[in-house]
Image: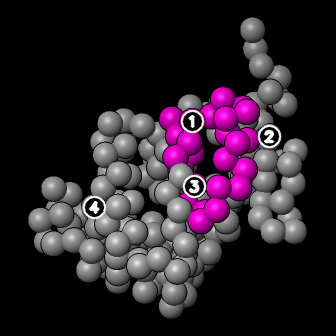
Amino acid sequence: MAKGKWAQGIKPRHFHWIIDGQLGVCERPGGYGMNHRRVRRQEEIIWIRENDFAFVVSLIPSNHNLHSYDELGMPWKHWPFAPTVDDEVAMGQIYPELRSLLQAGHRLLLHGEEMGDRIAGVLAGYLRWSGMVPDTTKAIIVIERILGRQMGPSGRALVAAAERTVGAADFAGG
């Protein structure tokens, strides 16, 4: 039976493929702050579920709205990445898990509160850390082009922290 337009949900705001068909990114489903809307959140989660994502990965420090994924049958992972944590320690935990899930063939959707420097820095750092983009400056440029926005100093600092997180063998994706 064909599904109607509304049964397919709506694409999350600022959705982009970072690794085509494998790793997507968006702002928090339903928006954030004063712009957050429950109905929009539900429609976006339906779109995520209907587009065969294995997991939603939330980097938001709090556990707000994780129950919504359960209610709509969407598996999720919560990797809180607060501005107050040590960036190198956090990325040292996030990146290996992210690589493991991607290598296992899981399609992932990662999100923070908004599509800002923090999420851009984490993503550029992952491209550099994983060895997919072997140059830090080029990793930043790749993410800036994908997201259609410049990365500021705080995002660039995260990329630098990601580079310090691991040794040269890990940069080759090992």
Q: Which residue is mark 2?
A: 43
Assess whether residue 66 is covered by the magenta stretch.
yes
How packed mark 1 is, by other alpha carbons closer than 10 Å (few <14, some 14-19, many 20 or more), is some
Q: Give me the residue at 20% from left, 57% from top.
A: 173
Residue 148 locus on image (x, y percent) = 60, 71
- Distance from disc 3 to disc 1, alpha carbons, whole Å, reads 11 Å
Describe the element under mark 1 as helix, strand or loop: loop
Closer to us: mark 1 or mark 4? 1
How packed mark 4 is, by other alpha carbons closer than 10 Å (few <14, some 14-19, many 20 or more), is many
Label 1 with label 4: CB-CB less than 8 Å: no
Residue 24 locus on image (x, y percent) = 53, 51
**Which is nearer the eye, 73 or 122?**
73
Closer to us: mark 2 or mark 3? 3
- Distance from disc 4 to disc 2, alpha carbons, whole Å, reads 33 Å
**Which is nearer the eye, 59 or 107?**
59
- Residue type at numbered disc 4: Ser
- Tell me which segment is drawn in magenta: 54-77
- Residue type at numbered disc 1: Pro
How packed mark 2 is, by other alpha carbons closer than 10 Å (few <14, some 14-19, many 20 or more), is many
Q: Which residue is mark 1?
A: 75
Q: Give me the residue at 77% from left, 64% from top.
A: 32
Labels 4 and 2: the sequence-earlier one: 2
Q: Residue furthest bottom?
A: 153
